[in-house]
Image (cartoon, rainbow, N blue to C red):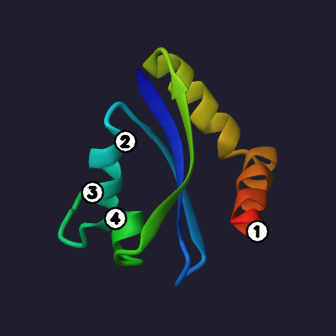
Amino acid sequence: MFYVYAIYNLLHQKIYIGQTYDLDKRISEHNNINNLEHTYTRKFGPGWKLIYKEKLSTRAEALKREKQLKSYQGRLFIKKLITVA
């Protein structure tokens, strides 16, 4: 199983959308300022909170859905979740 997810940093009001097979590990990596792999999330420091997740069967499906969420309409959908939370 794979996950497509969106995380939000309230302090900097930034959104990150990604996909992974281990969601808990990935969120932890985003919040680890010593992690060199995630330069976008690292530059805003810790404080990333999961605001959306979706479970998919294959990586191909996850990549396709990630691309949809990164589109204009997808980002509007994610931003609505932030105002609700």
Observer-side mark, 2 or 3, equals: 2
Residue type at the position of mark 1: Thr
Which residue is the extreme one toward the front? 85
Look at mark 3 in the image and give the residue it sits on: 29
**Disc 1 element:** helix
Decide: is 75 above or below 56: below
> Horizontal placement of 79 versus 6: left or right?
right
Instruction: Check disc 2: other Cα within 10 Å, few if <14, some if 14-19, many if 20+.
Output: some
Look at mark 1 in the image and give the residue it sits on: 83
Report the Cα–Cα distance between label 2 and label 3. 10 Å
Observer-side mark, 1 or 4, equals: 1
Mark 2–mark 1 CB contact (< 8 Å): no
Q: Give x and y (percent) for residue 63.
A: 53, 28
Report the Cα–Cα distance between label 4 and label 2. 18 Å
Mark 1–mark 4 CB contact (< 8 Å): no
Look at mark 2 in the image and give the residue it sits on: 23
Residue type at the position of mark 4: Thr
Q: Quadrant of the C terminus?
A: bottom right
Residue name at image x 27 percent, y 57 percent: 29
**Disc 4 element:** helix
Which residue is the extreme one toward the bottom? 11
Q: Give x and y (percent) for residue 50.
A: 50, 56
Mark carried by residue 11: none
Decide: is 43 above or below 66: below
Residue 42 image-quadrant placement: bottom left
Residue type at the position of mark 2: Leu
Pick whichever of labels 1 and 3 is earlier in the sequence. 3
Q: Give x and y (percent) for residue 41.
A: 40, 66
Report the Cα–Cα distance between label 4 and label 3. 11 Å
Observer-side mark, 4 or 2, equals: 2
Look at mark 4 in the image and give the residue it sits on: 39
Pick whichever of labels 1 and 4 is earlier in the sequence. 4
